[in-house]
Image (cartoon, helix red, strand yellow):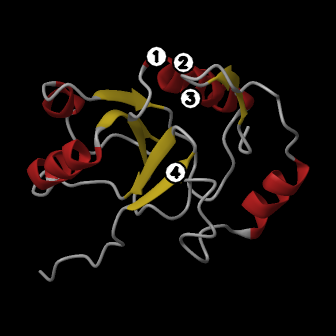
Amino acid sequence: MAPMNRPAPVEVSYRNMRFLITHNPTSATLTRFIEELKNYGVTTIVRLCEATYDPALVEKEGIQVLDWPFDDGSSPSNQIVEDWLTLVNTKFREEPGCCIAVHCVAGLGRTPFIRQKRRGAFNSKQLLYLEQYRSKMRLHFKDSSGHRNNCCVQ
């Protein structure tokens, strides 16, 4: 069987926030995947698809795994959006410089905010969701020098 041709991980940085958009590892690639996460300083993975690997193996390496699945090609529920905003707000305030990884099965269909980095990542249903989305103004916090940061993605 030929190996799957997966896109390389993409790091997205904005001020003190870092995100890694990646694909879903298999059991055979999990060890290499964990090493890659460590190289980027990932402290949390948000898994947007059904579980295909044992999170205990990742958590054993000190990386938290959060399961927030939603259907491929669709948009996240309001609860997932709220959970995401809470995670981002808390994580980057408590652990400046950390990195949050996000993946679905192929790193294309369910990981928002990446069209610029991975062209063709959104279908028409997802584009409509993004066009209608309104900011919740939840990602306002002060950086280490006391300046207020206003995140552009919220």
In this rendering, the answer to whether 73 lies above or below 3 is above
Q: Is residue 48 visible?
A: no
Disc 4, disc 2: CB below 8 Å? no
Label 4 vs 1, first from the N-terminus: 4
Q: Which mark is residue 90?
A: 2
Q: Secondary structure at mark 1?
A: helix
Q: Position of residue 41 (x, y in %)?
A: 28, 40
Looking at the rendered structure, the kind of residue marked 1 is Glu
Disc 2, disc 1: CB below 8 Å? yes
Q: Nearer the viewer, mark 2 or mark 1?
A: 1
- Left or right, residue 82 beside residue 32: right
Q: Which residue is drawn at the image coordinates 66% and 41% (left, top)? A: 76
Q: Identify which residue, 36 or 92, lies in the foreground.
A: 92
Q: Secondary structure at mark 3?
A: helix
Residue under numbered circle 1: 94
Disc 3, disc 2: CB below 8 Å? yes
- Left or right, residue 47 beside residue 80: left
